[in-house]
Amino acid sequence: MEKLKSSSGEVEIELELIDPNPHQPRQTITLESIKGKARLLKKHGQITPIILVAQEDGRYILLDGQLRTEGAKLLGWKSIRAVVVPMPKDLTQSSLITFLGFEDLNPLDKAEAVIQEVTKATALSSEEITTALATVLKRIERDSNIKELAKLTSLDVDEQKQGLESLRIIGEEQNLFLSLLELGLNPASVKSNLIPMLSLPDDLKNAIRQKGLKGAHALALSTLSAKALDTSEEKALKERTIITQKVLAENLTVPETRELIKKVKAEYITKTESESKEVKSIIQKISSISKESLVNVSSKQLEELKILLQQKLVEIEELSSQQKNI
């Protein structure tokens, strides 16, 4: 920022001349966050200038300062202090790098923006990126080289290439890791903290974007799945929604959220009962009955066996249905 100030200087730009960035990584901006920024601007004034990219038609693209700009509009300001820079070679990448260090960029927006940038750089799909990361990192962990990988984030490109080669990361895999390192990201951290965001159910993604649910809370809540609760998708969604609202309303910590989830699961999941030796013996006996062994059995006996098995099947289905509804 200081270099930009000294090179091009700060200028007052009319707000109506500023266009939104079409490659804005932040997809989430709530009215509450804008009001919060407006309160700070009103109380302290504009402390730091926004960054704009000059366009040929005399207008500007907003590169950094979305909340400050929206807050200024809410206050009725006509102009805002800015530093104007030339159009970068890659606006998408520049926008992403500008935002990656911002704590208020939620992990879902961050994950989607990173994957979009890596896909552009490597031509890999999000599924291929996820698979490649998991495969390579598993190998690196097995070789106890995960710390060596983390050190590469602070090196230049040539040193990063050499480091990756020493870790046996070459070809397409190397391009993937280089694209993440270029953004200042540790691939291991991307796999652990960002990739899981992409597979969250829609209700939790909406809670992150619309209600400010934190990423760690969302990941914990995602364990309340239909499979984990052994129930229907509809029932699991209803349960997740109730618990998510409670987490937000009571501002629960991650440990408190996990404890609450543990209690919910305990209500759904019944204790596994010990295997019955008697039933096991019966199953073995029924399995041993072959078609040939029934050839010489009287029709009366066959009918009795058929009726008995049908009755037991009805009882089994009733018990099975009751357990599913618990």
Image (cartoon, helix red, strand yellow):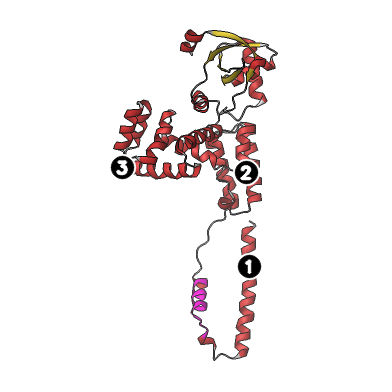
Tell me: residue 97, above or below residue 48.
below
Q: 112 or 52, which is in the foreground?
A: 52
Q: Which residue is mark 2?
A: 240
Viewer can see residue 258: no
Give the residue displayed 63% in from the left and 27% down from the top.
29
Which quadrant holds the C terminus? bottom right
The disc, 1 or 3, on the residue closer to the chain's N-terminal end is 3
Give the residue displayed 50% in from the left and 23% down from the top.
98
Q: Please report the bounds of the magenta region as a residue range.
A: 279-291
Q: Residue furthest front?
A: 56
Q: Amino acid at mark 1?
A: Glu
Q: Residue furthest left?
A: 166
Q: Which residue is mark 3?
A: 143
Seen in the image, is 283 located left or right of residue 19? left
Viewer can see residue 32: yes
Q: Position of residue 194 (x, y in %)?
A: 49, 36
Seen in the image, is 100 located left or right of residue 306? left
Give the residue displayed 65% in from the left and 42% down from the top.
241
Q: Which residue is mark 1?
A: 317
Q: CA distance from mark 3 to mark 2?
A: 39 Å
Q: Position of residue 246 (x, y in %)?
A: 64, 37
Tell me: residue 313, above or below residue 303.
above
Q: 165 or 242, which is in the foreground?
A: 165
Q: Position of residue 91 (x, y in %)?
A: 52, 25
* Quadrant assignment, res 323: bottom right
The 10 Å Cα crowd at callout 3, few under 14, some 14 to 19, many 20 or more, is few
Determine the secondary structure under disc 1.
helix
The disc, 1 or 2, on the residue closer to the chain's N-terminal end is 2
Residue 6 sits inside the magenta stretch: no
